[in-house]
Image: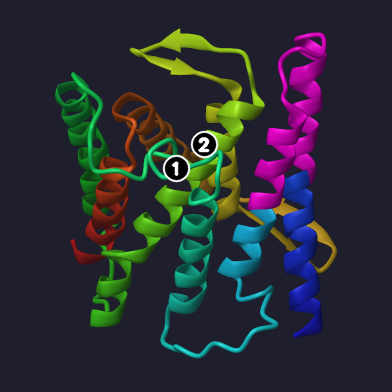
Amino acid sequence: MGDLNMDGMIGTAAIVGMVVAAGAGASALSRGRGVSWHWLAAAAAFLVLNDALLTNGWRFLPDMIGGDWNWQGKLLALAGTLLVASLPGIGWKASGLTHRQAPGSLKPAIGLSLIYAGFFVGLALAFPGAPVSAETVAFQLTLPGLEEEVFYRGVLLLLLARAFVDRFGYLGVEWHWGAVMSCLLFGLAHAFSYSEGRLSVDPLTMGLTAIPSVIGVWLALRTRSVLLPILLHNFGNTIMIVL
């Protein structure tokens, strides 16, 4: 258990190191004007908090809920994200934690949502799964999208948007390097691991998470809400196991 705890903390430290390195690179390219370091530090601290809660304190905390899935870790991480979103200077609305969609955004958002849904239906048909339990369906219908989208496409995206100052318009939204980083961090959360003294990244998993991650970020930036990303994330997870 001790080795597992340490592996988890080292893995988290490695990802935080990547965030700091990205900030240093952006700062160098913009001659020191492209990064707000206190917001980048806030984003890094938020990553550590999320990982600590998601892993039940890197497995130091007992699992009081049980089951085949990480219900407790997901609920703790979601609660932590909502608490951070409630802090002065952040706010739920600024983080996209609202059902209201930005004016004029719904039509293009629905079109892209259909592409997102079609991508996962295609994957599900290409790689049919085995029968699954009711607990698995219940979990995939709820917590993965709710916890991850509120974190990655909500509060973390806001913190990174404030950390990286430069902006560039593309596909009808205002992008920033923080949006790109949030996609990479989402991919690393699924594809990156540290075990037995070695860091590893699964390229296939990284690639399969990149497409929905970019779409999720576009939707969050365009609609100024994480509602559609949450619904689509849970749809994608669920359709992959029921078809």
Colour scheme: rainbow
Q: Report the side of 61 relative to 66 (left or right).
A: right
Q: Quadrant of residue 197?
A: bottom right
Q: 169 or 235, which lies in front?
A: 169
- Under mark 2, the amino acid is Leu
Residue 163 image point, x, y percent: 66, 28
Q: 132 or 46, which lies in front?
A: 46
Q: Report the side of 148 relative to 193 (left or right).
A: left
On screen, 64 above or below 85?
below
On screen, 20 above or below 108?
below
Give the number of marks: 2
Q: Quadrant of residue 60?
A: bottom right
Residue 41 image point, x, y percent: 74, 40
On screen, 109 above or below 143?
above
12 is within the stretch colored magenta: no
Which residue is at a point 31% across and 57% down the rendered structure image?
Answer: 237
Magenta-drawn segment: 17-46
What residue is disc 1 on?
154
Residue at far front of view: 88
23 is within the stretch colored magenta: yes
What residue is disc 2 on?
157
Which residue is at a point 23% across and 37% down the rendered structure image?
Answer: 100
Residue contact at pointers 1 and 2, CB within 8 angstroms: yes
Q: Secondary structure at mark 1?
A: helix
Mark 1 to mark 2 CA distance (whole Å): 5 Å
Q: 139 or 116, which lies in front?
A: 139
Quadrant for the N terminus in the image? bottom right
Q: Report the side of 176 relative to 95 (left or right).
A: right
